[in-house]
Image (spheres, helix red, strand yellow):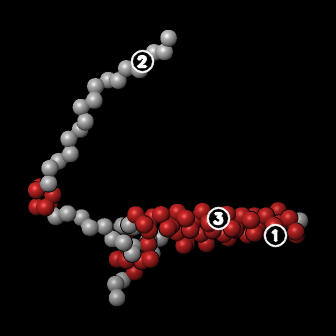
């Protein structure tokens, strides 16, 4: 088993970033709806604010750290020797484009 510090310092993969973004949006919207309904029913702005604040903190704890389930699809990088074998991309030679004026 790896130490926690080693696990949390690796880079999150692209699918993990997408999952974290979707989780964040879903959790924040759900907590906003629950907080609004609870605040409306109880007639308390403070209750609404506290529920939403708790939701933001919980959402941050779930989505900000790089948990292992965000790294299920690690990226495969080329070795430097392999990268030299492939041609480098060339920039497209596109000169300044002029828009045709409509008359």
Mark 2: few/some/many CA within 10 Å (<14, 14-19, 20+) = few
Q: Tell me where residue 36 appears, x and y as whole percent.
A: 79, 64
Q: Tell me where residue 27 appears, x and y as whole percent.
A: 63, 68
Contact (Cβ within 8 Å) of mark 1 with mark 2? no
Contact (Cβ within 8 Å) of mark 3 with mark 2? no
Contact (Cβ within 8 Å) of mark 1 with mark 3? no
Q: Pointer 2: what residue?
A: 100
Q: Locate residue 85 relative to residue 16 in the image: left or right.
A: left
Residue 10 appears in which quarter of the rendering?
bottom left
- The Cα–Cα distance between marks 3 and 2, rounded to whole angstroms, is 47 Å
Give the residue drawn at x 25%, y 36%. Answer: 92
Q: Locate residue 84 relative to residue 14 in the image: left or right.
A: left
Q: Pointer 1: what residue?
A: 38
- The Cα–Cα distance between marks 1 and 2, rounded to whole angstroms, is 59 Å
- Dot 3: what SS? helix
Give the residue drawn at x 14%, y 50%. Answer: 87
- Dot 1: what SS? helix
Q: Pointer 3: what residue?
A: 28
């Amino acid at each position: 088993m790896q130490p926690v510090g080693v696990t949390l310092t690796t880079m999150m993969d692209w699918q993990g970033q997408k999952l974290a973004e979707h989780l964040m949006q879903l959790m924040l919207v759900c907590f906003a709806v629950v907080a609004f309904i609870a605040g409306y029913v109880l007639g308390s702005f403070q209750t609404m604010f506290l529920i939403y604040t708790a939701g933001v903190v919980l959402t941050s704890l779930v989505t900000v750290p790089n948990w292992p389930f965000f790294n299920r699809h690690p990226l495969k990088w080329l070795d430097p020797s392999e990268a030299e074998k492939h041609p480098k991309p060339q920039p497209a030679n596109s000169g300044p484009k002029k828009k045709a004026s409509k008359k």
